[in-house]
Amino acid sequence: MSGLHVYPVKGCAGTSVASSPVDLTGLRDDRMLMLVDDEGVFLSQRKVPAMAALRPSLVDSSLVVGGESFPVVPEGQRVPVVVHRWQGSGIDQGDAPAAYFSDVLGKSVRLVRTPPDLHRESGGRTAGLVGYADAHPLLVVSLSSVDGLNARILERGGEPVPMNRFRPNVVVSGWPEPHTEDRVRRAVIGDVELGYAKDCVRCAVPMVDQETGLRDGPEPTRTLATYRRDPDGGVTFGMKAAVVATGTIAVGDKIDVLEWAAG
């Protein structure tokens, strides 16, 4: 395994880490904070690409972003929130972070955190639990998949895209065949066991430049559409996984595949 990435605030930039505890909801602190609009609906780069340029990090129980520091409130006023079709609640983080993010993004938003008693189930082949991620706790992508995609983009006269366009949690090296992650059904990394949930159907976010927060399409979606179309619509890239057994994983850990897809 060559990379681990935690996204403290859903939709904003991630942080590379050398190791991380893994809970049933995924990497510790991954997408446990979220920005919502006045109706409690989550914000994402699909409609607010500028979120990509915000680089928050968690330091000593505070959220640090843009030179500001906001203590994370683990319990307090609960407000209704919506992530796609899921409706739940969040702990409002107060007026100070709301004012900061509203000013930066140019629209009225609130920052919320997952309640300590959150129990949101994820589906797929292997069911699990999830925080404020779209639907599953972990996204696994291999370097060979990105290399294979970029070779095709170059053949079409386009510019290659970096790994961060796909916002993975776990980056796998050493698999020579692109999309090997699609065939994994059970695997152990460190002392953590993962189970395949589903292939990741991509939205418009991979067409957002993760450094500038500007839309930069049509790649990689244009090229993915030539060979990675999902039968139900969209294109796929990467594998979504559930956490079967918790523990700790670190960059450099070996991935032991316990079960492969049949055929």
Image: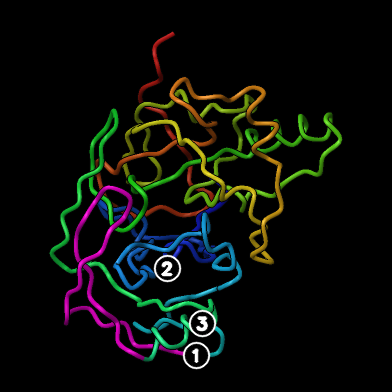
The residue beneath circle 3 is 65
Q: Which mark is residue 68?
A: 1
**Is 228 situated left or right of 21 in this image?**
right
Within 10 Å of disc 1 (Cα), the crowding (few <14, some 14-19, many 20+) is few
Residue 70 lies in the magenta stretch? yes
Residue 141 lies in the magenta stretch? no
Query: Residue, x 34% and y 87% (percent of image)?
Result: 71
Query: Which of the 4 image quarters holds residue 91?
Result: bottom left
Is the residue 78 above or below the residue 94 in the image? above
Q: CA distance from mark 3 to mark 2?
A: 10 Å
The residue beneath circle 2 is 9
Q: CA distance from mark 1 to mark 3?
A: 5 Å
Expressed as whole percent of the image width and height from the top left, the position of residue 194 reads: 33, 38
Expressed as whole percent of the image width and height from the top left, the position of residue 42 reads: 36, 62
Quadrant where the C terminus lies? top left
SS at mark 3 in the image:
strand
Q: How many marks?
A: 3
Query: Which of the 4 image quarters holds residue 125?
Result: top left
Which residue type does callout 1 highlight? Glu
Query: Which of the 4 image quarters holds residue 242?
Result: top left
**Is 20 situated left or right of 78 in this image?**
right
**Is 152 situated left or right of 104 in this image?**
right
Image colouring: rainbow
Expressed as whole percent of the image width and height from the top left, the position of residue 136 reads: 33, 45
Which residue type does callout 3 highlight? Val
Tell me, yes or no, whether the two marked residues, 1 and 3, touch with CB atoms within 8 Å.
Answer: yes
Expressed as whole percent of the image width and height from the top left, the position of residue 13 reads: 54, 65
